[in-house]
Image: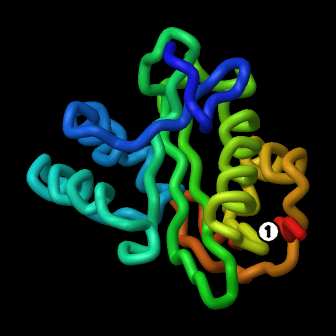
C-alpha cells in the first residue's frame, strides 16, 4: 500500500474511483445498510457512477466527500462520508460504514475517524464534526464516544424500525 497523507498504521482513506461503483452498488443496495443510512430505495449503477463523478469536484462545491476505507491489503472495507459541509460555520456531518462483518472490530473505523478528524481540522479548517446515531446502535455510540464525540441531543421516537420507534442521538466533536 503506497503511503498517503490519509493513512494510518492499518487503514488508508482514499478518493472514490470509477472501479468502486460495483462494491458501492452492493453496499448501498443492502437493506441492512438502509436502516442506518436513511435510504428507502435501491441505487442504480448509473446513479452511483454520477456520484463518483461528482466526487471529483471541489468539496466546497459539492458540500460532501466520500472516502473509501482500505484495509491493510488495500481492499475496500467501507466508506467514510463528510456531508452537509458548512464552510461558514466550519462544520460537517460524518457517516461511517465498515461493510463486511469480517472486517469489523479490527479498529478500522476508529483509525479512519482519527484520520478524518486530522484532515477536517488541518486541511478543511473545520471547527466541529457531528453525527446522528440510532440510540440502539451500541457499536457506533462506542466508536464515536471513544473518538471524543459528546452526546448533545436526542430526537425522540425519530426512526421507525420493525421493533418500533427509536430515538436518534446527535453527537458532536469540537476540535479547537
36 vs 26, left or right, is: right
Q: Where is residue 122 in the image (x, y as percent from the top left)?
A: 72, 58
**For mark 1, does the 10 Å Cα neighbourhood hold few (<14), some (14 to 19), or many (20 or more) residues?**
many
Q: Is mark 1 on a helix, strand or loop?
A: strand
Q: Which residue is drawn at 62% across and 79% down?
A: 158
Residue at point 57%, 72% (across, down): 159
Residue 6 in which image quadrant: top right
Residue at 68% in and 80% down: 90
Indicate left or right for 28 with 77 as reference.
left
**Image quadrant of residue 27?**
top left
Horizontal and vertical percent for residue 10?
67, 19
Is residue 145 in sight in this rendering?
A: yes
Q: Where is residue 117 in the image (x, y as percent from the top left)?
A: 73, 53
Q: Which residue is drawn at 24% across and 41% down?
A: 25
Q: Which residue is tagged 1?
A: 171
Up the image or down, 9 lies above or below 81; here it is above
Q: Which residue in the rendered view is the most extreme toward the top?
A: 73
Front residue of 173 and 14: 14
Camera sees residue 169: no
Where residue 150 appears, as percent x and y from the top left, is: 90, 66
Amino acid at each position: 500500500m503506497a503511503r498517503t497523507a490519509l493513512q494510518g498504521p492499518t487503514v488508508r482513506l482514499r478518493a472514490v474511483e470509477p472501479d468502486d461503483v460495483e462494491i458501492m452498488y452492493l453496499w448501498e443496495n443492502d437493506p441492512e445498510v438502509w436502516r442506518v443510512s436513511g435510504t428507502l430505495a435501491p441505487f442504480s449503477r448509473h446513479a452511483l457512477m454520477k456520484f463518483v463523478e461528482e466526487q471529483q469536484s471541489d468539496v466546497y462545491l459539492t458540500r460532501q466527500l466520500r472516502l473509501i476505507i482500505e484495509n491493510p491489503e488495500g481492499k475496500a472495507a467501507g466508506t467514510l462520508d463528510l456531508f452537509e459541509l458548512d464552510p461558514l460555520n466550519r462544520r460537517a456531518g460524518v457517516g461511517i460504514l465498515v461493510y463486511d462483518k469480517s472486517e469489523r472490530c479490527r479498529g478500522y473505523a476508529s483509525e479512519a475517524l482519527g484520520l478524518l478528524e486530522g484532515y477536517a481540522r488541518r486541511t478543511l479548517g473545520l471547527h466541529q464534526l457531528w453525527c446522528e446515531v440510532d440510540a440502539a446502535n451500541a457499536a457506533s455510540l462506542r466508536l464515536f464516544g471513544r473518538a471524543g464525540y459528546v452526546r448533545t441531543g436526542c430526537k425522540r421516537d425519530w426512526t421507525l424500525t420493525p421493533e418500533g420507534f427509536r430515538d436518534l442521538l446527535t453527537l458532536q466533536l469540537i476540535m479547537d
